[in-house]
Every structure is written in C-alpha cells, then in structure tokens.
Image (tube, coloured by chain):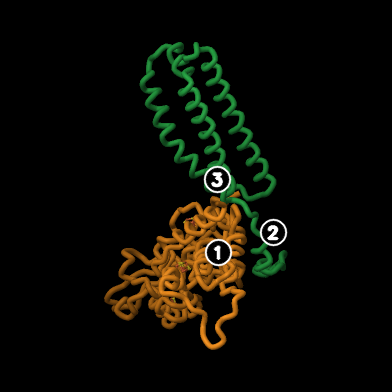
Amino acid sequence: MAGNDNLQIQVMRSQLGRVRGLGAAKSGVEHWWVERVTSIALLPLTIWFVVAVLMHLGAPQAVVAHWAGRTVNTVLLLALVMLTFYHMQLGLQVVIDDYVNDAKSHLATSLANKGAALILALFAIVAILRMAFKAPAA
Amino acid sequence: MVEFALPKNSKVGKGRIFKAPAGSKKTKEFKVYRWSPDDGNNPVIDTYELDLTRVGPMVLDALIYIKNEVDQTLTFRRSCREGICGSCAMNIDGVNTLACLKPIEEVKKAVAIYPLPHMPVVKDLIPDLTAAYAQLRSIEPWLKSDTNPPPDAERRQSMEERSKLDGMWECILCFCCTTSCPSYWWNGDKYLGPATLLAAYRWIADSRDEYTGERLDALEDPLKLYACRTIMNCTQSCPKGLNPAEAIGKIKQLQLERKG
Ligand code: SF4
Ligand code: SF4
Ligand code: FES
C-alpha cells in the first residue's frame, strides 16, 4: 500500500537527543551586538558622506581628491568603508544562516561572503589612501 | 536550501462540498484542510456550508458541529474550549490562533482552516508537535535550586520578584507563536522558537531559580537563540496577548550584560 511508504523510519534517535544535538556553540552575542553597534555608527558617517558628496557635485577630480586628502576626511572615509563592509558581511551572514542549510554550501557561501567583503573593502581603502597621499597634506 | 514550493505530495487539491441543508437561514462556508496518512492521497480542502443559527459563536463550535452532524471523519484537537489548554491551536483565516477563542463573525468571507504551519501533519488539523515539545524539554522548564526550601513552607518570593513572571506564566504552550515564526520555519531543527524561549526566560527571570547562568549558557548559540530576527510574528499571533519577542530581547540583553 502506497501509504506505508510514509511509515519508513530512518532516524530513531530521540527527539530530545536531536534537539540537544552538539550543544550550544557559546557564541552569537558578539555577532548580534557588533551588527547593532556598526549600524548605529554608520548612521552619522553615512549622512556626513552623502552631504559631502552632494556638496562636491560637478567638482573636478582634483578638488575631490584634495578634499579626501584632508586628514579628518581620510580617517572618516576609511572608518566609513571599513564599518560598511564589516556590517554588510555580518548582515549577509545572517541571511546565509537562514537560507543555506546544507553544511557544505553553508561553509562555501560563508567564506565567499567574508572574502568578497574583505576584497571590496581593501579596494575602497586603497583608493582612499591613493587620494590621500597624492594630495598635498593639509 | 529553503523550499519555496510545497513538495509534490503536499500540493493541496479540491475536496468535497457539503451543502447546507434546505431551509438554512444564515449559511457560511468553512474550507477545511483534510489529509489522512492512511490513503496515500494528497491533502484537499473540503467545503462545509453550515447554518450559523445552529452553530455556536466560535470557530471551534463550527468544527464540533461538523464532526457531530456532518462529517465524523474530521479530525482535530480540543479540550477546554475556553483558551486554557492550548489544544485547538490552528491557522484560521491566515492567522495562527485558538479555534475556541476565534469568533466566526470576525471572518468576513469563507472561514479557511488549516493546521499550524510548517509542522508535520498527523491528520487533518492535527500537527505533530513532538519536536517542539522536545525543544521545550531541552530548556528544563522547572525550578532548579541548590538551596533547600524551608522545611515547613514553600520557597518565598517578594511581590516585586513575583511580578517579573507576569506575561510569561500565562503561556499555555499552544505554539501559535512558534509556528508563525519564519525563522522557525527555515531552521526549526535548530532554532528553539518563541514559545520555548519565552518559557526559558520565565525560569531565567524567576528569583527562586539558581541556575540562571547555566540557562544562559545553554541558549548562547547563533541559531538556538540568535536565529530570532525580531520579525514579531510571534507577538502578533499569540492568542493570549503575550509578547515572546520581548522575552527573547531580554534574554539577548542578559547575554550581553554578562559579557561585561
Ligand atoms: S520576533 Fe523572533 S521569535 Fe518572534 S516571529 Fe520574529 S524571529 Fe520569530
Ligand atoms: S506565547 Fe502565546 S502563542 Fe506562544 S505558546 Fe504561549 S500562549 Fe501560545
Ligand atoms: S480547546 Fe483548549 S485552548 Fe481551545
């Protein structure tokens, strides 16, 4: 009878044993907390950046590079991109944890996520530093 | 990966239609999910037309009427019929709630009734909750204390200490919240879900319990606790008006606090 297929049992471990599993990983607090802290820190930084970009609309490249070369601006820009990519990586990891259940693909996507965030952040950092060191110090 | 479509054997088909008897004064349609493990068929939606003048006010009254007068094969759980036992939790009109507390009047069109979402179905409106019960068992929902109680009295608690349990002792473990939680749908094998986390916080907040640290240890996990994404479906669906999302937030606060 077709219905009997439903009765085939592959796992006989008790439900409690399955739920306890390997136990708690004793982590997760930091991920949760840093995700929130970075998002709050990014609020003023992003507003500052958007205003600065609007003020430089249409400005020639040299003017923008000069602006980025001022120590305050260089530091804030670096903080902005580092926090942005770190926050992005944390947030995407949560999405991966939710939607990628298979252990192998989970490891692969997690590594790809962290690697991509790192490379992109490095690109942005190098670009900022090049502007900073080209412009005359101010 | 997340499944975006139902597996083949869960696709819901059209079912039978039970017309209201001739001379009915106030008819209403009830569309009820039906599935039996015995025949190997896919689930179907059966339609029952009832004369509301013969039926009590709540959705559970309609189900009982169907079982008694129309179709004895309809299978569902109920016991107290007054919102205390948690047996009659199901999905009515798209929302998880208790059939005995849900007035038929509140549903404007046909009343759609399904089992609690994303759980294995035992039959018709009965979900298999054994995994959820095991999760509840895993947080050890009982008093743990190394101090002996007074020999001739119960353990004492101040009014303030006792008031910390308000909003939690009322939970009837119907699992409406847990089965409404998308995080639980995706990762229910690892995420403990709002009902169990509310119960965990009930013991964390109990001044008589001396195992707070161990309880927090057992929850400190990216998925067991932190898979809660504060979506708030749980709080919205709770038929007892409780706030599991808030309790989960408090557990996260304590986890942070003890890191210093
Ligand atoms: S607040 Fe947390 S537990 Fe409640 S529905 Fe959202 S993810 Fe689930
Ligand atoms: S918190 Fe509410 S919805 Fe969740 S199990 Fe308890 S009573 Fe049911
Ligand atoms: S029958 Fe007990 S809660 Fe509905």
B184 and A26: which one is in front? A26
Q: Position of residue B6 (x, y in %)?
A: 55, 55
A62 and B189: which one is in front? A62
Q: Are marks 1 and 3 in contact (CB under 8 Å)?
A: no
Which residue is outermost to the left? B25
Q: Are marks 1 and 3 on the same chain?
A: no
Q: Which chain is orange?
A: B
Chain A visual colour: green
Ligand 1 within 8 Å, label 2 CB = no
Distance of mark 3 from mark 2, alpha carbons? 22 Å
Q: Amino acid at mark 3?
A: Val
Q: Badge 1 local density, few (<14 within 10 Å), some, or many (20+)?
A: some
Relative to A106, is B69 above or below?
below
**Can I make out residue B34 in this image?**
no
Residue B189 quadrant: bottom right
Q: Position of residue B98 (x, y in %)?
A: 42, 71
Relative to A39, is B44 above or below?
below
**Which chain is mark 2 on?**
A
Closer to the eye: label 2 or 1:
2
**Can I make out residue A117 in this image?**
yes
Kindly identify which residue carries mark 2: A22
* Res A95 label: 3
B30 and B1: which one is in front? B1
Q: Amino acid at mark 2?
A: Leu
